[in-house]
Amino acid sequence: MSRIRIAPSLLSADFAAMGEELISMERAGADLLHCDVMDGVFVPNITFGIKMVADIRKRTSLPLDCHLMIVEPWKYVEAFAKAGAAYITVHYEACGDRLGEVLQAIRGCGVKAGAVVNPDTPVSVLQNVLPLCDMVLLMSVFPGFGGQKYIGSVTAKIREMKDMLRAAGRDIPIEIDGGITPDNVAEVKAAGAEVIVAGSAVFGAADRRAAVAALRERTK
Ligand code: DX5
Ligand code: ZN
């Protein structure tokens, strides 16, 4: 059985105390750190960018999973790679026909590449780029904000994605992002998700270590 990886989303961290938040996530047992980069154009919210990722990189040894919710992401791939991203994921909705080219550019920088689809985009749009992906990310909320409710219909999309990957002979992880809690993590794991993003469920918990452990425990 595949081991799941927990990726707390720094969107829910206290940005003014980021150094301490990173230590808190290491102590909590996070496997990687999910960095939500938002530009206020692709999504109706603004977070942080390249310098923040570079500064985070200096303060933690955990791999950084950079989720780019920005228009024209290809312009910034190299900069995020240099900043120390382990994964860079880009949206089909931001890249369109250029998605394959952008994934290749990410890999060309020596970084793992991931393609993302929004809840209302069919997974079939990724069919042609699967050979260029090291991970696929399915959004289970509309991107922009933490603390939203999991969209139940995405569970069937995880299964569909898993079948597509199997048929394509691609043994790469499916990441799920949005509204994940100890109450639905077993469902997404059973459907085929392996990398679990959780923002409010981890940062909002009184005991963050227990929150990460609960997510892991519920998938056993
Ligand atoms: C949403 C972000 C998510 C978000 C997840 O736009 O991509 O990563 O922070 O937060 P929760 O787990 O609170 O839904
Ligand atoms: Zn995200």
Image (spheres, rainbow, N blue to C red):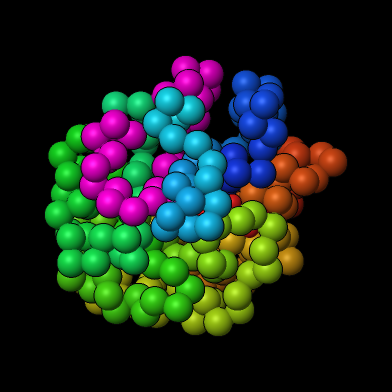
Q: Nearer the viewer, residue 158 or 178?
A: 178
Task: Give the image quarter of residue 138.
Answer: bottom left
Q: Nearer the viewer, residue 70 or 11?
A: 70
Q: Locate the C terminus by quadrant.
A: bottom right
Magenta residue span: 54-81
Asked if one can make out residue 86 in the rendered structure from this viewpoint, the answer is: yes
Q: Position of residue 26 (x, y in %)?
A: 62, 29
Query: Is residue 135 on the magenta stretch?
Result: no
Tag count in the figure? 0
User: What residue do we see at 38% from left, 51% from top?
Assistant: 70
Q: Please tell me whether residue 8 is drawn above or below residue 196 in the rendered image.
A: above
Question: Looking at the image, which residue sits at the far top?
Answer: 58
Left or right of 117, for residue 207: right
Q: Could you tell whether 211 is left or right of 169 in the image? A: right
Q: Residue at x 34, y 53 (%)?
A: 71
Residue lying at 53% horizontally and 18% vertically, measured from the top left? 59
Residue 155's place in the image compared with 195, above or below, is below
The residue closer to the viewer here, 85 or 95, is 95
- Residue 156 coordinates in the image, percent (x, y): 49, 81
- Is residue 11 rendered to the left or right of residue 96? right
Across and down, in percent, residue 103 comes to: 22, 52
Residue sitting at x 29%, y 26%: 82
Residue 66 drawn above or below residue 198? above
Residue 68 in the image, given as x and y percentages of width and height: 40, 48
The image quadrant that residue 167 belongs to is bottom left
Question: Which residue is farthest right?
Answer: 206
| Residue 121 placement: quadrant | bottom left
Going by the image, does 199 lie left or right of 183? left
Q: Is residue 218 visible?
A: no
